[in-house]
Amino acid sequence: MLDYIFFAPILSDKFKDHLTKVGIDFECDIDESFGSVQGEIISIADETSDAVLNELQVLYDELQDDLEQILEQEGDGLLMNAAGMEVKLKDGSICTLRVSPEIVTRILTVLEFDELQAFIENIARSVEEPDSGHFCHNKPE
């Protein structure tokens, strides 16, 4: 399953409405592992086409921007601050890495989001395919 997490019901409702309109089955669950902040996780099948996933990612990014605006308006953004990065693993599964929001914020002051994503993917690849050889050598691509 591919997971999308939301911290505002109004935004998760918009996402679920879109999934329903385009005929994508989904499951919902409440994630209590964020401490006092509960996130709603919406899961869809792994077999979803890349075109649909790209469309959903655009919508999800827009909804995350909306969340940022909601938090700024309500003035309690720090109470709901959480960050995660999705990484596609070697076996094709998607894993969400929970990252300290403070660290992500600092990194994004010097890197673009796609650069951060590439960095995280490099770390995941290094964990899945460890290289214990000498650091200074050329690796075949």
Image (cartoon, rainbow, N blue to C red):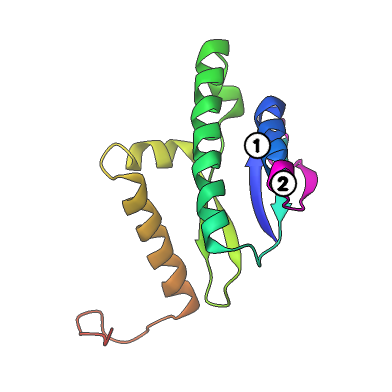
Identified by mark 1, the residue type is Phe
Magenta span: 20-38
Q: Position of residue 18 (x, y in %)?
A: 67, 39
Q: Nearer the viewer, residue 58 or 64?
A: 58
Identified by mark 2, the residue type is Ile
Q: Position of residue 133 (x, y in %)?
A: 31, 87
Is 115 displayed left or right of 82 in the figure? left
Q: Circle 1 is placed at which residue position?
A: 6
Query: What label does residue 88 carry, if any?
Result: none
Q: Residue at x 44, y 36 (%)?
A: 102
Q: Position of residue 27 (x, y in %)?
A: 79, 50
Q: Nearer the viewer, residue 129 or 1?
A: 1
Q: Does 94 sit above or below residue 64?
A: below
- Marks 2 and 1: CB-CB under 8 Å? yes
Q: Is residue 31 magenta?
A: yes
> Which element type, helix, strand or loop, lies under badge 2?
strand
Packing grade of label 2 (10 A; few <14, some 14-19, many >=20) is: some
Is 71 displayed left or right of 141 in the figure? right
Q: Nearer the viewer, residue 128 or 63?
A: 63
Q: Circle 2 is placed at which residue position?
A: 42
> Which element type, helix, strand or loop, lies under badge 1?
strand
Magenta: main secondary structure equals loop
Is 95 displayed left or right of 127 in the figure? right
Q: Position of residue 96 (x, y in %)?
A: 58, 55
Quadrant location of the N terminus in the rendered image: bottom right
Residue 37 visible in the displayed image: no
Q: Residue at x 56, y 37 (%)?
A: 82
Q: Does 88 sit above or below residue 58?
A: below
The numbered mark, 2 or 1, whose residue comes first in the sequence reads 1
